[in-house]
């Protein structure tokens, strides 16, 4: 029983950290994408980056 509770707690912590990424198109997201190698970008990432970051039209 204790192992199950520890496992559930660990999963909840892991999920809480993964939910903290910035919304695509925001200034924080643009800054994070500038640090990420361009080889790891998807086609959608590149399009969103161009639309919001290059043109300076950040989402609020």
Image (cartoon, helix red, strand yellow):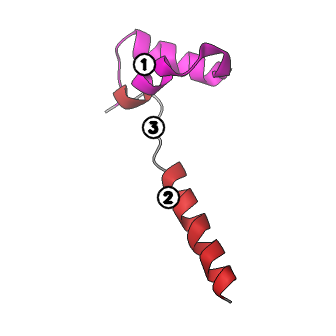
Q: Position of residue 1 (x, y in %)?
A: 68, 89
Residue at figure coordinates x 56%, y 58% from the top left: 15
Mark 3 element type? loop
Report x, y in % for residue 2.
Answer: 64, 86
Residue found at the very far front of the displayed protein: 3
Per the rendering, the mark at residue 52 is 1
User: Does the magenta portion include 34?
Assistant: yes
Which of 57/35 is in front?
35
**Image point (45%, 47%), residue name:** 20
| First-in-chain label (3 vs 2) | 2
The secondary structure that most of the magenta stretch takes on is helix
Q: Earlier in the sequence, mark 3 or mark 1?
A: 3
**SS assignment at label 2:** helix
Q: Which mark is residue 44?
A: none
**Is residue 59 depicted above or below 39 in this figure?**
below
Q: Nearer the viewer, mark 3 or mark 2?
A: 2
Side of 37 relative to 4 (left or right): left
Most extreme residue toward the bottom, as rendered?
Answer: 1
Q: How many marks?
A: 3
Q: Secondary structure at mark 1?
A: helix
Residue located beneath label 3 in the image: 23
Residue 16 - label: 2
Q: Which callout, 1 or 2, points to the residue nearer the camera?
A: 2
**Residue 38 position within the rendered picture, expressed as x and y whole percent measured from the top left:** 60, 14
Neighbour tally class for label 2: few under 14, some 14-19, many 20 plus, Cα within 10 Å = few
Counting other residues with Cα less than 10 Å from the Cα at mark 3, is it few (<14), some (14-19), or many (20 or more)?
few
Residue depicted at x 35% and y 18%? 57
How far across and down, in percent of the image, does residue 60 sit? Answer: 31, 33
Q: Nearer the viewer, residue 59 or 16?
A: 16
Q: Which residues are magenta?
A: 30-59
Magenta stretch containing residue 45, yes or no?
yes
User: Looking at the image, which is closer to me, 22 or 60?
Assistant: 22
């Amino acid at each position: 029983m204790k192992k199950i509770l520890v496992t559930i707690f660990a999963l909840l912590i892991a999920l809480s950290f993964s939910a903290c990424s910035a919304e695509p198109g925001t200034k924080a997201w643009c800054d994070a994408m500038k640090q990420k190698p361009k080889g790891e970008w998807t086609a959608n990432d590149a399009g969103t980056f161009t639309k919001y970051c290059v043109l300076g039209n950040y989402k609020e």
